Amino acid sequence: MLELSIALPIKVQNGGLFISRGVGRHPARKLTSWEIIFVEKGTLTILEENTLFEVKAGESLLLWPNRRHVGVEDFPADLKFYWLHFEVQNTGQNTSPLAIEQHCSVRDAQYVISLFRQFLSEQEKLQHSIALELLLLLILQQVSLSSGFEDKMDEAGASMAWKAKQLIRTKFHLPLSTSHLARALHCNADYLGRVFRRTFHLTLTEAIHRQRVRAAEKLLLNDSASLTEVAARCGFNDVGYFRQIFTKHTGLTPAVWKRRYCKEHINSG
């Protein structure tokens, strides 16, 4: 018979799943235990001492013991989050520490959800067992592995956004859209749109239009180029749509812009 003495640095109190009905808010309280929260859906807004947290889907929040926390607004109707109270024990043994950020995006949200569900299942069946502590450790480990994950995602997203911008600069005259760019960069179209907007503060469509309008401004200085030719060479299949976009970005129709600036260009040449 193999006998093992297992001393874990944590002790589980209890856990649960909160599903909002669109009424009420998180109570004001100060606990003596730690609490780990993971939001599956919606946004949880909570104040701990003087720090306000907005915990979105796929994010975790660690509430510290002996700190007052309170909800600052009513629960949104779509809110769904898991919570788990635990104590940290001093076992006197040398263990590898987990660096757990208080608020962060979790790398593998679906795995964390499955761990919480398994925890709740074990809690219902056994009330308490070593399995609960082990599951909690796995949850905390996933949060620990996610430390710095958001920064890395920001760097990767910015790199992808710059690649998209370079494609727009060189391919604006071709059929081009968010889906075209996403396929060329081998990524999800929604993801590319988000990181591009976060990096450059405009949508991919707006960036394509701006690049095409800049090219059209130069082509319109050539007095021999017709409006149809300029539109086609800048990636517009429809002259009416080209006129609409050009006017939106410059405040002038292509014809007015050409009369005004082509003359100035000739006189200053």
Image (cartoon, helix red, strand yellow):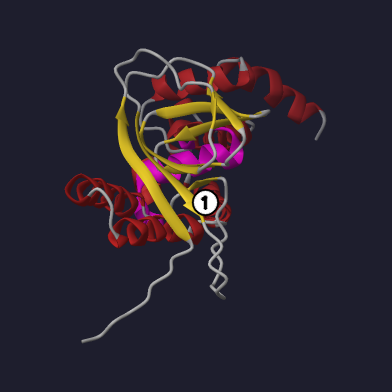
Instruction: Estimate the x, y position of residue 201 in percent, counting from the top left.
Output: 59, 33
Instruction: Estimate the x, y position of residue 225 in percent, counting from the top left.
Output: 53, 33
Residue 249 vertical placement versus 82 (above, below): above
- Residue at 56%, 32% (x, y): give it: 53
Query: Which residue type does callout 1 highlight?
Result: Gly
Q: Residue furthest bottom?
A: 1
Crowd tier of the residue under label 1, counting other residues whose Cα lies within 10 Å: few below 14, some 14–19, many 20 or above = many
Instruction: Please tell me which residue lies in front, 86 or 250.
Output: 86
Q: Is residue 108 left or right of residue 97?
A: left
Instruction: Estimate the x, y position of residue 252 in percent, counting from the top left.
Output: 60, 15
Q: Which residues are magenta?
A: 183-204
Q: Is residue 83 left or right of residue 115?
A: right
Q: Quadrant of the C terminus?
A: top right
- Residue at 25%, 85% (x, y): give it: 2
* Count of picture labels: 1
Instruction: Please tell me which residue lies in front, 123 or 21.
Output: 123
Secondary structure, magenta segment, majority class: helix
Q: Quadrant of the N terminus?
A: bottom left
Is residue 187 covered in magenta?
Answer: yes
Instruction: Please tell me which residue lies in front, 179 or 63.
Output: 63
Instruction: Estimate the x, y position of residue 259 in percent, counting from the top left.
Output: 65, 18
Is residue 15 covered in magenta?
Answer: no
Location of mark 1 (residue):
157
